[in-house]
């Protein structure tokens, strides 16, 4: 698994006053995806940024833009995120009523479609749409804020989703509380894309932190 491991720093913990430079810095530091947390102050109790900011940082890197939409409804603005430069667009299973339509819309824009589950949501919601997704995102904190503690009780969900995915070419991403202490547990359970916000941005040497995360993943 380690050779296919992808590290996705979340710019939620970056310095927003220097977002373009921060994106360049994590690119140079060897990240795989750039994880972009979009929050609406309604689906989650925090507000971040939307398509205009994503469009502004797009020219700063060629890395995959992994856009995590914590907004409800998401469907009306999916095209705006696609046009802003997202490569993967992930919606929450708890948001729009017609998940199948949201996923089909994302793919119709030529983008990869992701589906995320909050800690209290069963993996069963993924089962009926597994062939409509390119990525499944398991939240290991309650969405809304960086720097929270990893919820170990979500590890079984990761394991069961890896079994459900089987040999389909679907990324299994884990988001929340990932550090050198927690990364091995989720990789062993089957995750291959690891979001790390505070773990990466709290230090000055992003390359060293990303390297340490890869090493700790085993
Ligand atoms: C939380 C966000 C996460 C967050 C992770 O709602 O989806 O991506 O930035 O931050 P850390 O890695 O600090 O838990
Ligand atoms: Zn996220």
Image (cartoon, rainbow, N blue to C red):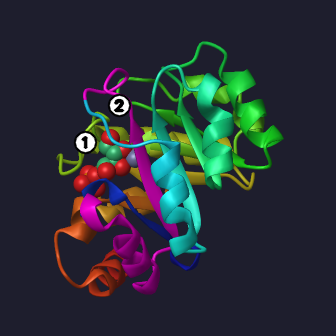
Residue 116 place in picture, x, y as percent: 51, 36
**Between 43 and 171, the one nearer to me in the picture:** 43
| Mark 1 secondary-structure assignment | loop
Residue sitting at 51 percent across and 76 percent down? 2
Reply yes or no: does residue 23 show up in magenta.
Answer: yes
- Judged left or right of residue 199, residue 105 is right
Q: Which mark is residue 131?
A: none
The answer to whether the residue labelled 2 contacts the one labelled 1, judged by CB atoms less than 8 Å apart, is: yes
Reply yes or no: does residue 133 show up in magenta.
Answer: no
Asked if the beta carbon under badge 2 is closer than 8 A to the nearest atom of ligand 1, the reply is: no
- Count every numbered label the image shows and give the total: 2
Looking at the picture, does residue 124 appear above or below residue 65?
above
The 10 Å Cα crowd at callout 2, few under 14, some 14 to 19, many 20 or more, is some
Query: What is the distance, in whole Å, between disc 2 and disc 1 at their CAs?
Result: 8 Å
Q: Earlier in the sequence, mark 2 or mark 1?
A: 2
Q: Which residues are magenta?
A: 16-45
Q: Which mark is residue 119?
A: 2
Looking at the picture, does residue 35 appear above or below residue 64?
above
Residue 136 quadrant: top right
Camera sees residue 23: yes
Residue 161 place in picture, x, y as percent: 56, 41
Indicate the quadrant containing the N terminus: top left, top right, bottom left or bottom right.
bottom right
């Amino acid at each position: 698994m380690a050779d296919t491991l992808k590290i996705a720093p979340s710019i939620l913990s970056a310095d927003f006053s220097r977002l373009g430079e921060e994106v360049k810095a994590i690119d140079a530091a060897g990240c795989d995806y750039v994880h972009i947390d979009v929050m609406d102050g309604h689906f989650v109790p925090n507000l971040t940024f939307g398509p205009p900011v994503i469009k502004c940082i797009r020219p700063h890197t060629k890395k995959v833009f992994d856009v995590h939409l914590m907004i409800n409804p998401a469907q009306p603005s999916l095209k705006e995120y696609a046009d802003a430069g997202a490569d993967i667009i992930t919606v929450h299973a708890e948001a729009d009523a017609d998940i199948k339509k949201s996923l089909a819309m994302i793919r119709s824009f030529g983008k990869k479609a992701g589906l995320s589950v909050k800690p209290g949501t069963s993996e069963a919601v993924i089962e009926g749409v597994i062939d409509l997704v390119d990525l499944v995102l398991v939240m290991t904190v309650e969405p809304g804020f960086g720097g929270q503690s990893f919820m170990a009780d979500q590890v079984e969900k990761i394991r069961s989703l890896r079994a459900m995915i089987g040999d389909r070419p679907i990324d299994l991403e884990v988001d929340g509380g990932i550090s050198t202490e927690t990364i091995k547990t989720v990789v062993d359970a089957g995750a291959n894309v690891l979001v790390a916000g505070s773990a990466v941005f709290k230090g000055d040497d992003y390359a060293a932190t990303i390297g340490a995360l890869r090493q700790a993943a085993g």
